[in-house]
Image: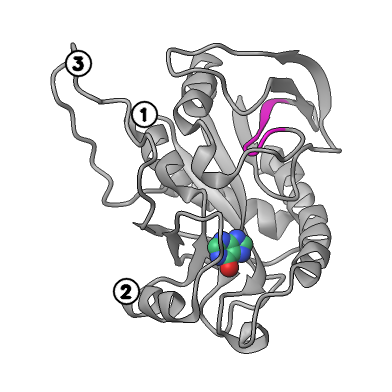
Amino acid sequence: MLAIIGGSGLTQLSNMEIERREVARTPYGEPSGALAFGRMCNEPVVFLARHGYGHTIPPHLVNYRANIWALKEAKVSGIVSVASVGGIRSDLAPGTLIVPDQIIDYTWGRKSTFFDGGESPVRHIDFTHPYDEALRRRLLAAVRAAGDSAVDGGVYASTQGPRLETAAEINRLERDGADIVGMTGMPEAALARELGLPYAAISVVVNYAAGRSSSEHGIHFGDIELVLQESMVRVRNVLECLCHV
Ligand code: HPA
């Protein structure tokens, strides 16, 4: 059973038949909301809204550990993350779908590991390739099956938020090699790896990053909202195709 973690603009899956909701308790506290168990084109799936069902939890306060732990406990076979991002590279215009293959983590002060010392011996994970390649391929195949297109690969910069970046910060991220910028990619991906769960992401570019192209003089939230609504219809179609590929 696959898990889908939905971000901004995707707090529910209209094409999913929900069978039950379960409030999970974990050693790390409560997840962002109840896990919604159900079916999408007859395949079992579990959905979780990263920011809560009323979109009330900002990126730096999401209980990433509880979310990932609860999905592990639910025995999911992998996690697909949906998140909106800003496009740094000039060809990554609003409306572009992208399945990233690398991450740079700029977040701070988040509870970012299950291996926090205490009783158990220190453990490290290999994170050379932060996303699961088989799940990435499946996502890209689902995009094609949906008759849509997505950019294969890119470097996701995870910033702290909740504010957007300055133009100089975006220039720095670009010098570092980042292609897109979002606020929730980390520690989510690393926590999934720590628990051995395959994890991949489909990112939706909803704005040019600060200082770039149409965002040269600022980012317009009204425009983001429009792109978000249109793009999430496409993402829902892609997710539905996941069970056919
Ligand atoms: N920066 C960070 N996170 C984002 C952005 C952005 O420009 N757009 C959507 N999420």
Image quadrant where one finds the C terminus = top right
Q: CA distance from mark 2 to mark 3?
A: 35 Å
Q: CA distance from mark 3 to mark 1?
A: 21 Å
Question: Does residue 85 appear in this view?
Answer: no
Please, what is the three-letter code of the amino acid marked with disc 1?
Gly
Q: Is residue 48 left or right of residue 209?
A: right
Please, what is the three-letter code of the amino acid marked with disc 2?
Asp
Return the x and y of residue 125 as percentages of the image width and height: 23, 36
48 part of magenta stretch: yes
Residue that numbered label 2 is attached to: 176
Return the x and y of residue 92 as percentages of the image width and height: 59, 77
Mark nearer the viewer, 2 or 3: 3
Please, what is the three-letter code of the amino acid marked with disc 3?
Gly
Answer with mark 3 or mark 1, whichever residue precedes in sequence.
3
Residue 19 location, quadrant: top right
9 part of magenta stretch: no
Return the x and y of residue 11 as percentages of the image width and height: 75, 39
Per the image, label 2 sits on a secondary structure element best described as: helix
Q: Quadrant of ligand 1?
A: bottom right
Q: 136 and 91: which one is in front?
A: 91
Name the mark on residue 207. Answer: none
Q: Is residue 80 left or right of residue 8?
A: left
Answer with mark 2 or mark 1, whichever residue precedes in sequence.
2
Question: Does residue 201 appear in this view?
Answer: yes
Is 54 rendered above or below residue 23?
below
Residue that numbered label 1 is attached to: 196
Magenta region:
44-52
Q: Main secondary structure of the magenta part?
A: strand
Name the mark on residue 118. Answer: 3
- Crowding around mark 1 (Cα neighbors within 10 Å: few <14, some 14 to 19, many 20+) is few
Is 56 rendered above or below residue 211?
above
